[in-house]
Image: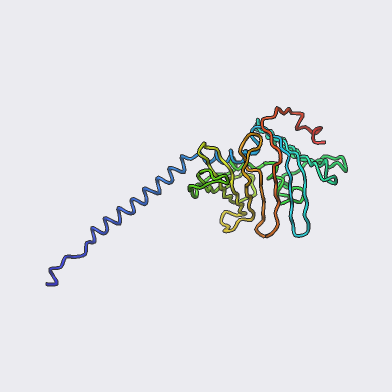
Amino acid sequence: MLNTLPSPPRRRFGARLAARLAGFASLAACAGALADELPLGEWIHEAEHILRGKTSAAVMSMKIKKASYEREYDLLVLTDDRSDSGKVLMRMLGPALWRGNATLKVGDRISFFDPRTSRITVMGSSMLGDNWMGSHFTNDDLMRETDLARHYRYELLASQPATDESGAAVTQYRIQLTPLPQAPVAWGKVVYRLNVAADRRVYPLKLEYFRRADDAQPARTLDYGDLRMLGERKVPARMTMTLTDQPGEFTRIEYRKLKFDSPFSADDFSERALR
């Protein structure tokens, strides 16, 4: 009687398992193909330039909170990205002690002006990672010498439907950036979170900077917020930089006024303008 029982359906089970594995492989291939089709580099470029446009003029405040002191600046910032040699001029409007200090970037050349000495100092590449005026932002952050869309490769980590601050439906993407070989960058990995709206406009949400690609925790985090109309465009008007090993400290930049597409000339980004 026992000998008449059918043997376990091994072949049938094996066939089902093979079919499932093939299905998983197909899904993974589709996900990879989707990631290849998404314009990740274009999105990152657009997110990085959302507050700059082709040209921009902005008045903003910077608040620095550290364990030992707090400080606030008022700034005028001009940018011109109409050519490959991007230009940035940052001038301190206040308080009185710092008024007139300025930083100028034209191409790869970055210069500082100190009104107390009336001297212009050209910054070496080793100073790109230095903090700007005691803030948690580096010279590189504010001068944009590093181009995330050009110096890094991209990998889609995740996507999901979400809503932005105004309640509008968006798709949120998490993108991992790793540096290209020989790229002149300081970070071993950047995880970029951004929203893509129904009209395909791109809004940055959060950047996490890792010193090494295999680090589990970011060294610092940049958060964007306060999405509103400025310069006739919907933009995040607030940027906050925090460091993981300095809890409670931050530097916050808030845009007060913003104008796009000003007809700047080369003289607006000259050493004469720096003074």
Q: Is residue 213 above or below residue 254?
A: below
Q: Position of residue 44 (x, y in %)?
A: 57, 41
Location of residue 222 with respect to 46 vertically, above or below:
below
Figure quadrant of the N terminus: bottom left
Give the number of marks.
Answer: 0
In the rendered image, residue 51, in percent from the top left (x then y), is placed at 65, 39
Q: Residue at x 77, y 49 (%)?
A: 72
Which residue: 78% across, 59% down? 68
| Residue 64 pos. (x, y %) | 74, 52
Q: Nearer the viewer, residue 130 or 261?
A: 261
Identity of the residue drawn at 74% across and 37% down: 89
Q: Position of residue 179 (x, y in %)?
A: 58, 46
- The reply, left or right, for residue 134 in relation to residue 25 is right
The colour scheme applied to this rendered structure is rainbow
Is residue 205 found left or right of 270 in the rendered image?
Answer: left
* 246 on left or right of 205: right
Picture layout, residue 208 above or below residue 245: above
Q: Residue furthest right?
A: 117
Q: Quadrant of residue 53?
A: top right
Q: Residue furthest front?
A: 167
Q: Quarter of the image holding residue 50?
A: top right
Screen quadrant of the C terminus: top right
